[in-house]
Amino acid sequence: MKHLLLSSLALLSCSATAAFAANEVIPIRTNSTDLVLKVGPNNRLYQVYLGERLLNESDYQHLPWDVYAASDGSVCQRGWEVYNTGGSEEFFEPAIDITHTDGNTTTYLYYQSHEQRTVEGGTETIIRLADNRYPVQVTLHYVAYPEQDVIKTWSEIVHHEKADKKARNIAPNGCIQLRSVNSAMLYFRRPQYWLTEFSSDWAREAQMSSQQLQFGKKVVDTKLGSRAAMHSHPFFEVGLGQPAAEQQGEVLMGTIGWTGNWRYTLEVDNVGALRILPGLNPNTSAYQLKAGEVFTTPEFIFTISNQGTSLGSRHLHDWARKYQVRDGEKPRMSLLNNWENTYFDFDQEKLANLMKEAKTLGVDMFLLDDGWFGNGDHARNGDTAGLGDWEVNHAKLPGGVPALCDAADAAGVKFGIWIEPEMVNPMSDLFEKHPDWVIRQTNRETYYYRNQLVLDLANPAVQEYVYQVVAQILTDGSVNGDSRVCYFKWDCNSPITNIYSPYCKDKQSNLYVDHVRGVYNVMSRVKENFPNTPMMLCSGGGGRCDYEALKYFTEFWCSDDTDPIERLYIQWGFSQFFPAKAMCAHVTDWNRSASVKFRTDVASMCKLGFDIGLRHLNDDEIKYLQGAVANWHRLQGVILDGQQYRLVSPYESNHMAVNYVSASQQKAVLFAYDIHPRYKEPLSKVRLQGLDATKRYKVAEINLMPGEASTLSENGKVFSGDYLMKVGLDAFSQESQHSRVIELTAE
Ligand code: DGJ
């Protein structure tokens, strides 16, 4: 009876607003993009426009809500429903699919109200929709950042349904089931659509490939549970009308903020419209939602550029630094890591020597990687034991973290440390004590990924444990309350395997979502309580590269593949969506056939670090490195905070070039790389971008080997910005694995 009453109330309120709301227009605007929504005569909400901003708001009234023509030529009263629902007259992929407590699988959403409010960086539009038969409300959120042309959107779902006795087997606990749920839904009507996706694997991240989308669906997704990426990254581009290109054409660039199972559905329908649904991956994940609990989808962030991906990337970089990435406007620390130097084989003395090497290089910090914890049978001397036991290994490091901090102080560098707190090796004290804290199946043979399992972070007790582990390490060695552990590298090497949560009990299908939310609970608590500790996000290379996790992290590790040639492609790929400031690039011994200079010049275009031992290097190489580190520090404001212009693609040539320009346009840095030029290959000049055409810039090649004179013909000369952008510099060479770093200073 109560249920009926509620339903009728909802129905009443829908019809009450219907007359008033029909034709109501809701514009979501950035400086260059309009997303226009309109309430139809049936009181449902439709997308009537998405594209280049319309000059006259008065033209909104001309935008029809019913965009379809039926095949017999008659007008069909259907439009592009903004958040279309399963079980309605919509025949394509729905934005949301719900099973209600009585087993009914249909949902219809009607416009209730909307409001707009000012938020940091832009305007948030909040739109409330509700079913007229079931007490289910959906709230759509859109934050438009005008200057960056970025829109961030997500949805919230809440219901007040009662358990239905007659349908006990469907909803025994009064939950509705979200069989699929997306953050938003976007429509485009263009002659062609070209998808650029970013496929991936360990040591092969962010590989770009394009294909034309034809009728039907293309699904890009992951099912890794604990990370955003391994086989595909959570971002994509769609060339609207033509393949996505750097400098021209209309392109949509979108990315979802979710460190777990996500899915993009791109569907070209019967009339050639492209429907894009970014959301949670519904695979084994029908979410059981309790009455009164708000289900919030991941954020989907997108920009539309009319001048190709180059401009779109700059908009995303700007937006990310200002509004999304933790400490996005603060400087970053350069570092020396010991991972590839020592792997698990180190002791206090070896590390103290590396700290001295860090000082010799001139970097800010020494970062201690995996292998410093676990004792006895569970000592972390390889990857088979110790994860979970976060007590320092007494045999390797008798003085513990305080002694390491002292050694770093003595060397004159800061100290940072690696953790992987969400994981456990079966060979650990933690596993022996709390087997019920682990995601695993006791009635099947266990599948191990890197000999480890994932802790059940859906469980609040496990969240508390993980938080305390992190907090303890950060405060160990503190002096007068000040933490001397100045940096964290937070790793996550295993996807979720053996999917079963002892904690989730009869709600196993909630595990994937609740686990990720548990991870965020810990991360946000760490950020709140340790606001001054920068942190690197890492996941067996670049598996964690999403904008939700980056709210809690200052940067991410792009790949374990540090071969500079491979890195040119990997960094080109990630730079489509992430600012150089968030991308960690280290100089290592991968590909020793490339000079130390080439390897360092490649890493210098992002957040610079090292993972090499100086003992293998000669004096000239060490001198070169000292100069390069000093240059990077001096130019950090241009490289990490400036505007990035990708000039020459490694996908389209045997070279790569990118330049950065400071906000004042006083300084610029050009990085030019030759990969494997062909014999007698004709070389083009590199034309810079983003300079002030009227300014005059002095050209200086930097990062030269000691005693080496620049062979750049324009070195030391002065040119106008106009000349540099229209004519360019002879920055490329015929040599394989050759690089140039060129500093431009306005006079
Ligand atoms: C994977 C990371 O990507 C590496 O940089 C290193 O930290 C190892 N894990 C340590 O186990």
Image (cartoon, rainbow, N blue to C red):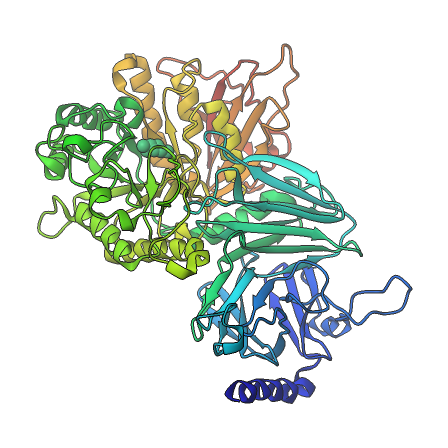
Residue lying furthest right in this view? 72
- Residue 132 shown left or right of residue 434 in the figure: right
- Residue 378 shown left or right of residue 384 in the figure: left
The residue lying at 74 percent from left, 68 percent from top is 79
The residue lying at 27 percent from left, 40 percent from top is 419
Relative image position of residue 732 (x, y in whole percent) = 56, 21
Relative image position of residue 151 (x, y in whole percent) = 55, 59
47 or 577: nearer the viewer: 47
403 or 200: nearer the viewer: 200
Relative image position of residue 154 (x, y in whole percent) = 52, 63
Relative image position of residue 309 (x, y in whole percent) = 61, 44
- Residue 522 shown left or right of residue 447 in the figure: left
Q: Quadrant of ligand 1?
A: top left
Looking at the image, residue 231 lies above or below residue 18? above
Residue 331: quarter of image: top left
Total numbered badges shown on the rendered structure: 0
288 or 28: nearer the viewer: 288
Residue 88: quarter of image: bottom right
Using the rendered image of the protein, determine whether residue 704 is visible from the camera's viewpoint: no
Residue 207: quarter of image: top right
Using the rendered image of the protein, determine whether residue 359 is visible from the camera's viewpoint: yes
Looking at the image, residue 223 lies above or below residue 563? below
